[in-house]
Image (cartoon, rainbow, N blue to C red):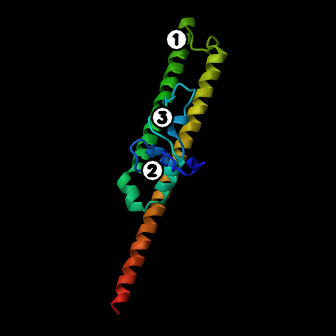
Amino acid sequence: GGTMMLPSSKRSKSCFDRDIDPLYCAWGLDVYDLFVNTKSDLGPNPYTVDEAARKEYLSLPPEEKDRLGFEAKLFSKLQELVQHCDRTVARNQDKLQRELQRQSQKRGTQDYVVDVSDGAVEELVRTEVQFQYMKEDLQEALENLAQVRTKEEEAVKELKEQGNDGEENKGE
């Protein structure tokens, strides 16, 4: 019955492990899960998502977080995703304009288009709305990240000031 006392061969993950997802550590969301089953699916996450590593990361002092650079990586990835969404929306708007023009020329008039299928228009609208929501979510995440950084910087500044006050008082 002594086998129950053996330490687990699988140690818990650390935010310093190379295979840990830095984006998950910084945000708490798996970025690769955001677009699953859409045309923008990012594929499988090449990193390991681990809650213990995230908790460890969150407990680190701001200087150590800065050294790891996870927030900067997250910020870059979110900017990249927002740009991708913007490009897709622009591409779909261009497609719709070209289709409207093509249908209009086909009839030789500039009146209302009746030849575009309702299904195609609905799909385009749904896609547009979906991308708008994704863009808003990503924008909100970027703003939240910026707020967290500001609070961290203020806390570090406050701690440093408290440390300096303590040094000055010792000499008196």
Q: Earlier in the sequence, mark 3 or mark 2?
A: 2
Identify which residue, 26 or 135, lies in the foreground: 26
Instruction: Let me know if residue 170 appears in the view.
Output: yes
Mark 1 neighbour class, 10 Å CA radius: few under 14, some 14 to 19, many 20 or more: few
Q: CA distance from mark 2 to mark 1?
A: 57 Å
Q: Residue at x 59, y 23 (%)?
A: 124
Q: Earlier in the sequence, mark 1 or mark 3?
A: 3
Task: State the SS at label 1.
Answer: helix
Answer whether labels 3 and 2 touch (C-beta < 8 Å). Answer: no
Task: State the SS at label 2.
Answer: loop
Instruction: Let me know if residue 143 appears in the view.
Output: no
The residue where tag 2 is placed is: 14
Mark 3 neighbour class, 10 Å CA radius: few under 14, some 14 to 19, many 20 or more: few
Task: State the SS at label 3.
Answer: loop
Estimate the x, y position of residue 35 in percent, counting from the top left: 55, 32
Question: Which label sits on residue 102?
Answer: 1
Q: Residue at x 39, y 77 (%)?
A: 163
The residue where tag 3 is placed is: 45
The quadrant of the rendering that contains the C terminus is bottom left
Q: What amino acid type should be assigned to the residue bearing mark 2?
A: Ser
Above or below, 22 relative to 162: above
Estimate the x, y position of residue 144 in percent, counting from the top left: 52, 52
